[in-house]
């Protein structure tokens, strides 16, 4: 994390653009938690960039006063990488849904994670495509009935975002619930403070189009990770991600480790190349002299 | 003599390309101008590879027509080039003891069998040196850069140790001696030294040139995905950018590469990507985003044969429609096309200048043969380039910043993260001046008018296309991209024959400089548009935008035009 402001309160991060989510949407809780996290970390409006893709949750940057980049469906992670690499002093946070990040944008996630790109990725997972009115998503429970799958999905398995991000090489992986803004704010703060690629999966129910995985369904599902969980242990983190107790989901930090980040490694390359912003262009031209 | 074309053909992986590069550079050192042309298979090893070099004491405009000298490394190469071995040409071929089993006799063709495989294997005990044996023979026989070639070998292989230098020099000398001892020269082709005095030249490929131009323009970010024939642009930048503290990223795919470029540009970088047709196809949605969000960016498209995977290593100019019209919705953009290697440097600078000035995506079209070929070009003088940077938002402390503020010329000052008071949301949604989403008819109208209004300024801002020839003409040729050089040479030939022919050489292919095109067309009885694609894409665009009705002359065989082809078509059109 990089930029700080002394005086901003959570509400000071809120823009005057009207929030367009349905009443009761889990994403309100996320927005709330994010504002609180930004205030707690004293992020500045001018040095924070919120990047998103397309979908209900990807509208989130509009509701914040910081710099924002509402990109294309699935492209938030590479856009955010470009922003961060062009100016590593910025705090760059990515917001998106399960369809955006794990279906149409699923080809980017592994690479942004394994490169340990210095970003925080906050996913609002509602197990459904909301903006197009109720299709099954990659995280939908197998057999889910949606508008494109009136007889239930034929897919025998769903994406487990935690397991995916762990094996892709994310150096911080956590899970939270939109119904717990306080705990969520803590988790988001830790994710932003983490050096490298951090991923927070937030179960954020869609009240309008998902009648199965509802708020009430999740309300009592969350339990804290065991006190003795070793978050430096990848195998143990994977075990917790794929084997929660029946009918339960863990919240908290599954995995956290330190690895050189993309920004650090690129800096090393430039050091090897004896980088000099003002190197005379003539030296480049003369490389082609006969 | 002042002009000579030598072609070398053989199996991919036999060192034809490296031998060709070597003699091109040596010739350049001896004061000659060079322009090379390569075709090779899409596979790393095997298949027919060809390297052609045109040497001249004067400026070279194109690959030329056919060749005077052909050097065949194997039977396949010989078979593929038999049609062009016309009376007056010379054939050097691997015989005896090589892949070619029969002695070759052709009417009017001077033949010099050279057992290059045998010499390399038996005398030198190094089959790989076959290319150097051939090089020695060629250099001796046609008097090309004899001394410079040896000096170059000493320099190039010096790092690998004296033994390597000696082996290569010995191979060169073996080829030379074989010719000396066995043949009395019966062909008329002798190049000799060029004029070295007062020359300040560099030798550079088209792909490197696009990269060098970007460096001159101040590019500090490139993200790309490997693709033939564009990879060398990124290869060059991967060593150049870090030296200036820039950033190079190898992205996971082409969507990611343009997405990263847009993110970087938004954050203030001068950013580009390089790709070929299939990559540009994948980038279309992001290209539309760049138009919508008015983000400066440069995309170099080194075109190849299409559609789909197509002909990855072959020459074609068939991405014009996509560059100009690709993607959904009404998206404004600028398209430039380079004539030759020197142009690739200049137009890469222009591309950045236009992208920054108009906050718009700029596509620079080159093509496979231009990208791969090397040319001797006058050393660019960095002082002659004017560098334009985007109009930046200046915080004034009171007014709310409007990212898409409507202005007379459609250009709105741009903030970047870190600027106090400059925060806004870059967006692909239609928006109001503030960047807040807006789908009202009024906002969609004004914002489309703003984004397309910028193009009106571009046609006046960009230098007018050059007119070759003067007065009234029976035929006026208009073309684009690397075909321009070939047209230039064909028109010179036609005018020497006394034909009333002229040409227009546009570099800005979108938006069209309609005024100048119409003025040119008014001086010509007929307009001929040669280009290397099936549909006659530029002819179609000219027809649609200017109302002139040109004779479309499309070829699509995976090879560029020869000047002779165009000259013949000019005569046919008269």
Image (cartoon, grey):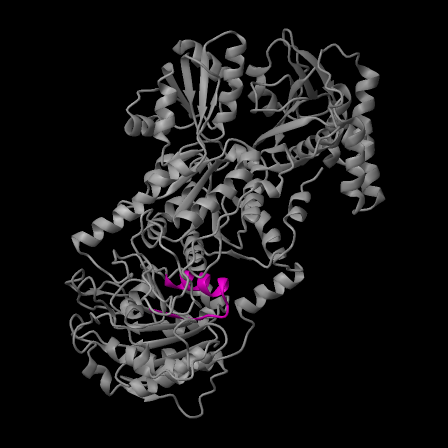
Q: Is residue A208 left or right of residue B318?
A: left
Decide: is B323 above or below B504. Answer: below
Q: In the image, what residue occupies the spot 59% across and 47% down?
A: B236
The one of B248 and B346 positioned closer to us in this rendering:
B346
Decide: is A267 above or below A282. Answer: below
**In x, y percent, where is residue B469?**
48, 17
The one of B95 and A173 positioned closer to us in this rendering:
A173
Q: In the image, what residue occupies the spot 29% across and 64% down?
A: A99
Residue A78 painted magenta: yes
**In x, y percent, where is residue A89?**
50, 70
Q: Is residue B62 left or right of residue B480?
A: right
Which image quarter holds the C terminus of chain B? top left
- Magenta segment boundaries in residue numbering: A76-95
**In x, y percent, where is residue B443?**
21, 54
Q: Quadrant of residue A124?
A: bottom left
The one of B558 and A49 positioned closer to us in this rendering:
A49
Which image quarter holds the N terminus of chain B? top right
Residue B365 painted magenta: no
């Amino acid at each position: 994390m990089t930029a700080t402001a002394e005086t901003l309160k959570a509400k000071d991060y809120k823009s005057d653009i009207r929030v367009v989510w349905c009443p009761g949407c889990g994403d309100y809780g996320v927005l709330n938690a994010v504002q609180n996290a930004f205030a707690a970390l004293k992020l500045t409006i001018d040095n924070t960039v919120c990047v998103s893709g397309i979908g209900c949750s990807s509208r989130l940057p509009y509701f914040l006063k910081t710099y924002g980049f509402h990109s294309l469906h699935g492209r938030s992670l590479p856009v955010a990488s470009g922003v961060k690499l062009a100016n590593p002093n910025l705090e760059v946070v990515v917001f998106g849904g399960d369809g955006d990040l794990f279906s149409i944008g699923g080809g980017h996630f592994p690479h942004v994670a394994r490169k340990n790109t210095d970003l925080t990725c906050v996913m609002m997972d509602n197990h459904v495509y909301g903006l197009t009115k109720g299709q099954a998503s990659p995280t939908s429970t197998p057999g889910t009935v949606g508008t494109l799958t009136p007889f239930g999905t034929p897919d025998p398995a769903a994406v487990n975002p935690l397991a995916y991000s762990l094996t892709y090489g994310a150096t911080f992986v956590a899970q939270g619930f939109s119904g717990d803004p306080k705990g969520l704010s803590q988790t988001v703060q830790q994710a932003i403070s983490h050096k490298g690629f951090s991923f927070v999966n937030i179960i954020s129910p869609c009240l309008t189009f998902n009648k199965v995985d509802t708020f009430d369904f999740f309300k009592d599902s969350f339990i804290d990770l065991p006190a003795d969980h070793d978050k430096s242990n990848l195998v143990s983190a994977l075990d917790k991600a794929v084997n929660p107790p029946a009918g339960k989901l863990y919240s908290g930090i599954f995995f956290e480790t330190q690895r050189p980040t993309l920004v650090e490694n690129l800096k090393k390359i430039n050091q090897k190349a004896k980088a000099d912003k003002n190197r005379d262009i003539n030296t480049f031209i003369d490389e082609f002299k006969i | 003599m002042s002009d000579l074309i030598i072609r070398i053909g053989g199996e991919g992986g036999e060192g034809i390309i490296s031998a060709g590069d070597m003699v091109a550079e040596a010739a350049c050192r001896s004061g000659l101008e060079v322009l090379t042309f390569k075709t090779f298979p899409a596979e790393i090893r095997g298949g027919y590879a060809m390297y052609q070099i045109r040497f001249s004491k004067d400026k070279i405009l194109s690959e030329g027509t056919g060749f005077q000298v052909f050097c065949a490394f194997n039977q396949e190469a010989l078979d593929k080039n038999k049609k062009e071995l016309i009376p007056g040409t010379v054939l050097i071929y691997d015989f005896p003891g090589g892949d070619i089993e029969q002695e070759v006799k052709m009417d009017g063709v001077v033949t010099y069998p050279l057992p290059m495989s045998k010499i390399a294997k038996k005398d030198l005990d190094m089959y790989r040196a076959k290319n150097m044996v051939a090089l020695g023979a060629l250099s001796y026989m046609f008097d090309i850069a004899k001394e410079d070639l040896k000096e170059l070998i000493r320099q190039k292989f010096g790092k690998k140790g004296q033994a390597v230098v000696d082996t290569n020099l010995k191979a060169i000398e073996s080829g030379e001696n074989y010719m000396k001892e066995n043949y009395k020269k019966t062909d008329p082709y002798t190049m000799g030294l060029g004029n070295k005095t007062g020359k300040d030249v560099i030798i550079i490929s088209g792909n490197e040139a696009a990269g060098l131009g970007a460096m001159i323009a101040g590019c500090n970010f490139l993200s790309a995905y490997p693709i033939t024939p564009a990879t060398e642009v990124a290869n060059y930048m991967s060593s150049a950018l870090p030296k200036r503290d820039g950033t190079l990223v190898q992205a996971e795919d082409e969507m990611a590469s343009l997405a990263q470029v847009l993110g970087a540009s938004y954050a203030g970088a001068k950013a580009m990507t390089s790709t070929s047709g299939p990559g540009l196809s994948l980038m279309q949605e992001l290209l539309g985003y760049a138009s919508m969000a008015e983000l400066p960016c440069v995309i170099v498209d080194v075109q190849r044969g299409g559609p789909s995977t197509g002909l990855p290593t072959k020459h074609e100019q068939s991405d014009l429609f996509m560059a100009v019209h690709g993607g959904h919705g009404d998206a404004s953009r600028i398209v430039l096309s380079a004539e030759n290697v020197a142009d690739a440097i200049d137009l890469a600078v222009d591309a950045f200048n236009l992208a920054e000035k108009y906050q718009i995506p700029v596509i620079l079209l080159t093509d496979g043969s231009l990208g791969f070929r090397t040319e001797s070009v006058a050393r660019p003088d960095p002082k002659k380039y004017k560098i334009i940077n985007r109009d930046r938002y200046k915080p004034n402390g009171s007014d709310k910043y409007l990212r898409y503020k409507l202005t007379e010329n459609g250009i709105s000052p741009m903030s970047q993260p870190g600027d106090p008071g400059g925060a806004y949301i870059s967006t692909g949604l239609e928006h109001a001046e503030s960047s807040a989403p807006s789908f009202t008819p009024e906002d969609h109208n004004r914002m489309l008018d703003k984004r397309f209004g910028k193009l009106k300024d571009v046609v006046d801002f960009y230098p007018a296309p050059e007119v070759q020839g003067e007065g009234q003409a029976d035929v006026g040729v208009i073309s684009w991209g690397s075909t321009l050089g070939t047209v230039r040479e064909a028109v010179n030939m036609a005018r020497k024959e006394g034909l009333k022919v002229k040409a227009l050489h546009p570099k800005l292919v979108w938006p069209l400089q309609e005024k100048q095109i119409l003025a040119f067309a008014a001086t010509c009885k007929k307009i001929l548009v040669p280009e290397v694609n099936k549909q006659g894409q530029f002819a179609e665009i000219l027809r649609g935008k200017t109302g002139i009705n040109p004779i479309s002359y499309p070829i699509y065989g995976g090879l560029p035009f020869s000047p002779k082809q165009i000259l013949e078509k000019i005569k046919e059109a008269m």
